[in-house]
């Protein structure tokens, strides 16, 4: 099986029903994608497939037909506008959910560079932060959107 992940063609032999998250983490060592609930409900495992946010814990590798981007592939130097605003606003507390939060927000801003407050709330509603950093997450998305 071959997939394009973070702009690199990758080949591997795995069960086609293996969730993409486990391929990324266990087979490829891309541990920025986090395991949260295993049911696609919390968003910790969010990656992009062809620019769209997907929950990798419930996405079998056999269903992936496009370019996969993980948090490691979002920006080679960690200076994507969202990553910058996350740092500047000290968004994370524990940080566990943050890669999924950033990937979900990146898909939002790619589709809508200047989202309204309500659009941000709606787009991010499926990503859970156990530490309750929602206000800082919202502020970082607004900041990144203004920089774009």
Image (cartoon, rainbow, N blue to C red):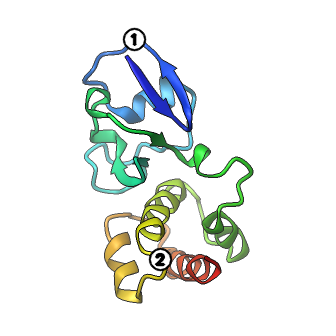
Q: Secondary structure at mark 1?
A: loop
- Distance of label 2 from label 1 (alpha carbons): 39 Å
Badge 1 crowding class, 10 Å Cα cut-off, few under 14, some 14 to 19, many 20 or more, is: few
Q: Secondary structure at mark 2?
A: helix
In the picture, measured across the screen, residue 85 lies left or right of residue 55, that is right
Task: Identify the image quadrant of the C terminus.
Answer: bottom right
Residue 27, horizontal then vertical, whole percent = 49, 21
The residue sitting at the bottom extreme is 117
Q: Which label sits on residue 115?
A: none
Badge 2 crowding class, 10 Å Cα cut-off, few under 14, some 14 to 19, many 20 or more, is: some
Viewer-nearest residue: 91 or 61: 61
Residue at 37% x, 16% y is 1
Viewer-nearest residue: 71 or 90: 71
From this viewpoint, is residue 46 visible?
A: no
Identify the residue position indicated by label 2 in the image: 134
Residue at 35% x, 81% y is 119
Identify the residue position indicated by label 1 in the image: 13
- Sequence order check, earlier mark of 2 and 1: 1
């Amino acid at each position: 099986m071959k997939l394009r992940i973070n702009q690199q063609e990758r080949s591997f032999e795995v069960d086609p029903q293996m969730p993409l998250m486990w391929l990324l983490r266990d087979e490829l060592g891309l541990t920025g994608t986090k395991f949260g609930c295993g049911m696609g409900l919390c968003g910790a495992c969010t990656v992009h497939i062809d620019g769209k946010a997907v929950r990798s814990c419930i996405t079998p590798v056999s269903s992936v037909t496009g370019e996969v981007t993980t948090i490691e592939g979002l920006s080679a130097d960690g200076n994507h506008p969202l990553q910058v605003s996350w740092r500047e606003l000290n968004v994370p507390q524990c940080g566990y959910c943050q890669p999924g939060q950033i990937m979900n927000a990146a898909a939002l801003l790619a589709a809508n560079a200047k989202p309204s407050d309500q659009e941000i709330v709606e787009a991010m509603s499926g990503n859970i932060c156990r530490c309750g950093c929602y206000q800082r997450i919202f502020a970082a998305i607004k900041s990144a959107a203004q920089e774009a």
